[in-house]
Amino acid sequence: MFNITKHIKVFELPRFKFPYCNCIWIDDDIGCLIDSSPTDEELINLTGKKIDLIVNSHGHLDHYFHNIDYPDTRVLMHEKDQAMAQSAKAYLHNFNFYAQVPDEKLHTLYMDAIHYRTTHVNANLSDGQIIKTGKTHFQVLHLPGHSAGHCGFLFPDQGFVFTADLDLSPFGPWYGNINCSISELIDSIERLIKLKPDFIISGHGQALIKERIISRLNEYRDIVYEREHRIVSLMYRGKHTPVEIAKHLPVYQQLPPPQQVFFLYEITMIEIHLQHLIASGKVIQDKDNYYLSSGVKPSSFDPPR
Ligand SMILES: [Zn+2]
């Protein structure tokens, strides 16, 4: 744990490990947690502390994992992510299991492996909302793309943003839910670039980022364009279904373990790119097959700047 101010503290896990994330604890008149999945070692800091409010950046399990330990605490989450945090069926649906993984035994295996649990939610988060905890206040930034209801939090007095899962990972952004959107993701990253924060607290990996913030945000966004370019190249070479394209790993390039799960994410993220390419007129869909619109070639495919 490290302090940003007397009242704002950060629980950090400097490497990615499910189901943990970097969280903010505001130890103020109102005790507030932003995300509730610190490691067990960090959780000890909260023993005997009053947590009146939990603000969840989004509805992925590794951000609300310990909500269940605070049954009487008020929980806020964006409306668009509440279903998957409140129903196993909605979680599996949003993670594309019903469309891509016919074997239901694997659904159970996955949910058991991640220790899926639901959370109560008391109220919605909305863009622009100001949350006051006494001496501290912060503003909700709805930053969709990673999930439909994904939010970051701007601390104007301290000059930083908690960017949650727009985490500036060198591997690039994740958008493996069926309601993710490339254009929303790009807009969310651009919004962070325009905000020019003094520093960022990221949801995974090293929490405090203060060097090269704008360049790193640009690089993070450009990984999305590079993936899209690879997908267009594969389609140009005759791959027309998401699974055919996915076998060449244009998103991950190398699958981390467990590979079955990451291959599902690969397929879903390709589908999200295909929706984006359809919306921009570069791809047309014919049932399960996707084709480049006439005249679209990888060589003519310039990522927008
Ligand atoms: Zn997430």
Image (cartoon, grey):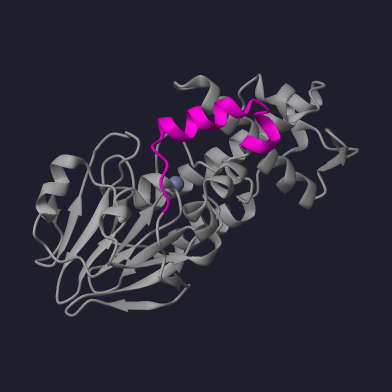
Q: Nearer the viewer, residue 202 or 19?
A: 19
Quadrant in the rendering for residue 161: bottom left
Quadrant in the rendering for residue 75: bottom left
Q: Residue at x 62, y 49 (%)?
A: 182
Q: What is the magenta range?
A: 97-118
Q: Nearer the viewer, residue 32 or 301?
A: 32
Is residue 149 visible in the rendered image? The answer is: no
Decide: is 60 above or below 298: below
Q: Residue at x 49, y 42 (%)?
A: 173
Decide: is 55 above or below 276: below
Is residue 42 visible in the rendered image? The answer is: yes
Q: Residue at x 33, y 34 (%)?
A: 16
Q: Which SS does the magenta portion mostly show?
A: helix
Q: Residue at x 73, y 41 (%)?
A: 274
Horizontal placement of 248 versus 294: left or right? Answer: left
Query: Residue 18: percent from the left, percent from the top?
Result: 35, 35
Count the labels in the image: 0
Q: Is residue 38 magenta?
A: no
Horizontal placement of 244 versus 154: left or right? Answer: right
Horizontal placement of 189 versus 4: left or right? Answer: right
